[in-house]
Image (spheres, rainbow, N blue to C red):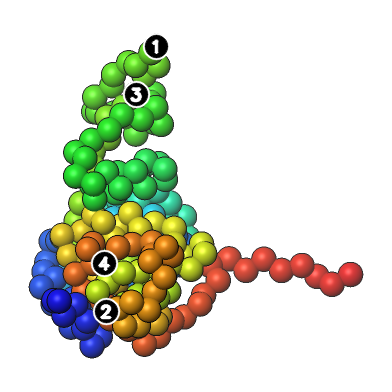
């Protein structure tokens, strides 16, 4: 069996170069591959196109790569928590392609399944559909959306075995399973790394065939993006 286990994020990111397309799992700050993102920042690569549900916050997640201006383009469905993103976009430094959230998930899933494109009614009649093919099916208009693939995919899982089989925990699953299938090289960081055979096959969310590299993350910061509290009566 090919050895997929790497000692840390830095070694797992070997081969990442300028101007590549990087797919990143997570939703807000939940389930993001924080060790991989920090190692990507420290590598100094630039001109990246990043595909992710969001751009993190100013000092965490993909916000770290925006601070260092390593991202030239974001393909996202939501970017409202990042002031650095706003400044760079408004000044013309950062390219942005908005994509409806469900469409983004399906574009990643399609890319991972080898499906070049699909039709969806979401976005018809809006700026999202400008310049795209529109077709009618059963009296309703649909817009053609293309599948997404990337040079590298970075995901975060709760548990993984040495073959790359992954288990996500609750809402931290989010975009990670789709992202994991759509990278030419998929790197998984896990909170617990176990031997092959220790995971229940019925509980595996991402089969190891999609994962080329895996490592045990050292830091797992459980940030809350927006804390909502209630005063005691």
Q: Do labels 3 and 2 touch, CB within 8 Å?
A: no
- Is residue 154 in view from this perspective? no
Residue that numbered label 3 is attached to: 142
Query: Between tags 4 and 3, which lies in front?
Result: 4
Q: Quadrant of the N terminus?
A: bottom left
Answer above or below: position of 79 versus 39: above
What is the x, y in percent for residue 71?
24, 63
Whole-angstrom CA distance, mark 3 to mark 2, is: 43 Å
Looking at marks 4 and 2 on the same chain, the residue that comes earlier in the sequence is marked by 2
Query: Which image quadrant is residue 125 in?
Result: top left
Q: Is residue 133 left or right of residue 30?
A: left
Give SS at disc 4. Answer: helix
What is the x, y in percent for residue 141?
36, 19
Residue that numbered label 2 is attached to: 162
Residue that numbered label 4 is attached to: 208
The residue lying at 25 percent from left, 85 percent from top is 8
Whole-angstrom CA distance, mark 4 to mark 3, is: 35 Å
Looking at marks 1 and 4 on the same chain, the residue that comes earlier in the sequence is marked by 1
Q: Which mark is residue 139?
A: 1
Q: Compare residues 23 and 200 and report the one nearer the observer.
A: 200
Give SS at disc 1. Answer: loop
């Amino acid at each position: 069996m090919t050895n997929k286990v790497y000692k840390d994020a830095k070694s797992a990111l070997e081969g990442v170069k300028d101007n590549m397309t990087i797919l990143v799992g997570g939703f807000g700050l939940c389930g993001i591959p924080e060790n991989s993102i920090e190692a990507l920042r420290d590598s100094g690569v630039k001109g990246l196109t990043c595909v992710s549900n969001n751009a993190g916050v100013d000092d965490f997640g993909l916000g770290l790569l925006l601070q260092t201006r390593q991202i030239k383009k974001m393909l996202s469905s939501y970017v409202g928590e990042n002031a650095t993103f706003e400044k760079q976009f408004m000044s013309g430094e950062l390219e942005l392609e908005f994509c409806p959230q469900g469409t983004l998930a399906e574009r990643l899933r399609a890319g991972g399944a080898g499906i070049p494109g699909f039709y969806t009614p979401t976005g018809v009649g809006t700026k999202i559909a400008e310049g795209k093919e529109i077709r009618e099916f059963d009296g309703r208009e649909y817009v053609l959306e293309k599948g997404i693939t990337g040079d590298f995919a970075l995901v975060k899982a709760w548990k993984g075995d040495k073959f790359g089989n992954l288990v996500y925990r609750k809402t931290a699953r989010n975009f990670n399973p789709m992202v994991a299938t759509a990278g030419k090289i998929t790197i998984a960081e896990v909170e617990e790394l176990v031997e092959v055979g220790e995971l229940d096959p019925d509980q595996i969310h991402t089969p190891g065939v999609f994962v080329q590299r895996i490592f045990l993350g050292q830091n797992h910061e459980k940030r809350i993006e927006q804390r909502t509290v209630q005063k005691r009566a």
